[in-house]
Amino acid sequence: MDEGARGTSNGEAHMDKAASGNGNNSSVVNGLPICKKEAAGSAMNRVKKIVMANLLVILTVAGVIIGVVIGLGVRNVELSKAHILYFGFPGELLIRLLKMIIIPLVVCSLVSGAASIDPKALGKLGGWAMLFFLVTTLIASAIGVCMAFAIRPGVGAGAKPALSGMDDAIPQSKEVVDSFLDLVRNIFPSNLVSAAFQSYATSYKLIKKNITDESGVSTNTTKYIVEKVPFGKEVDGMNILGLVVFAIVFGIALRKLGEEGEILIKFFNSFNEATMVLVSWIMWYAPFGIMFLVAGKIVEMEDVGMLFASLGKYICCCVVGHAIHGLLVLPLIYFIFTRKNPYSFLWGIFTALATAFGTSSSSATLPLMMKCVEEKNGVSKHISRFILPIGATVNMDGAALFQCVAAVFIAQLNDYSLNFIQVITILVTATASSVGAAGIPAGGVLTLAIILEAVGLPTNDISLILAVDWLVDRTCTVINVEGDAYGAGLLQNFVDRNADKIEGAELTEVRLEEVLPTKPAPLKEEEATPLIKEDPKVTLEGTESERCDQESVM
């Protein structure tokens, strides 16, 4: 009887709902129209929820597509250089906004991240991250070499393509030793303020010396020798590597201070949170800015047909290699270690990948990548804000792959056969030099000269690489930031697996306001800070069970 009454009340409720919706009570007798309307309504609600949850991704994809359409349409109109500059202004504004946020985001996130993790756990996480970055970069370099030897982009091209206006952009050739010494020098910047916008680079000056005879007397003839003398100078470009190292060491030092450093750690935590709020605002401008970045670059292109006819195989080699690494290798590594769907993870960072494609800068994509992996893929803040800035600096999978392809391409173009030792040299040099590659547009081209010098190839052919770098560099940046994100996801999985061992002591954050009010009596001075020691008797509920778990593990 109760069940019948309950069923009647439910039926009356559905009838009232349908009547209020369209006023047609007679259609409720058999119940079919109501079921259809409910099914249609629930389907619409599901679609609406999906659209709202992925609204930013949808807008970003739409921005890229509309940008291509607008660029192809405006391309038919002859615009002056000034008009092209004005046309791309909204895209330039997006890059400026992202670059504005890089320094406070990197410094504050690394200081707070290094201070909130126990030094032992910090070393373990950093070691696993560097191992992942090194292995994936080596794999990317190997893929690049294999693709170059398989497709042979420099064979059968005939004469070298003549491209005007590119010779001035060729970077100065530099000795391999000086390049790596510059890398070490930039790790330890002499001025932190100047490191925000300048980095150290070695240049050369030629000094002529007269040849002396055996008696030591200078001859009057015109015979002389030219000595190449290196000297250092500051060049434009952020020294992100030096800032990263300083921030990590400074965060460790603050943790060592204990109670005295807690106020400053709280300051950096708050600064970091405020920066992420700014990032969330910038994210909604990103689709509009990306649209004009893509459209402006398409309008700038000159004689695309000739470019693709002469360098099409090289472009194909790079893009296919990046696709293999980004769609097969990295997802496979993620799946092997986590047993999770790597493509759902990839969908969660799609907005950051589209921004990377539009800006060609892994450093500029860093703020959006942090937001995406934390909100969409469940990576904790102390993992993402510690690993991602390091990855944006040292992990350059896409750049290493492109550099290997470019080195083999230039060798084939000059009919220069590479032996096994030279191929290994290209692999190792590309992997090592990608660490110091700047996370800026065309940053990989600057380190390409190091690889060419290492195997004795002419550096003046870099002008051919620069001609199509606007396209290849975009896929490079996408692979770079994708590797950073997968690295953060793998470390999060590593931390989750070992949570019972390290959650209580090694991944504690500074939250005095949650612990101090629950203390019945003042503690000793050495026990008053959670950064040094935790008292299990006075913490919140659940701590006793955590202590038991830790004892059982031991």
Image (cartoon, rainbow, N blue to C red):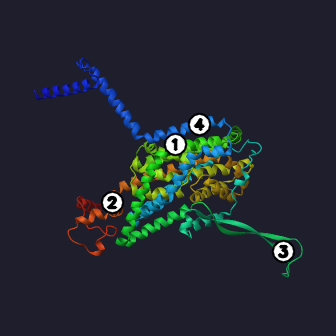
**Label 2 to label 3, Cα distance in Å?**
70 Å
Q: What's the CA distance linking mark 3 and mark 1?
A: 64 Å
Left or right: residue 3 versus residue 502 is left
Coordinates of residue 332 in the picture (x, y in percent): 47, 45
Q: Which residue is mark 3?
A: 211
Q: Earlier in the sequence, mark 2 or mark 3?
A: 3
Residue drawn at x 26%, y 18% is 27
Q: Are there few (<14), some (14-19), or many (20+) residues within 10 Å of tag 2?
A: some
Q: Are marks 4 and 3 in contact (CB under 8 Å)?
A: no
Query: In terms of sequence position, does the residue under pointer 4 or pointer 3 come before the other?
Result: 4
Q: Position of residue 544 (x, y in %)?
A: 23, 61
Residue position for label 2 = 503
Q: Residues within 10 Å of mark 1 (few under 14, many from 20)?
A: many
Mark 1 or mark 2, earlier in chain: 1
Q: Quadrant of residue 307?
A: top right
Read off the residue under disc 4.
70
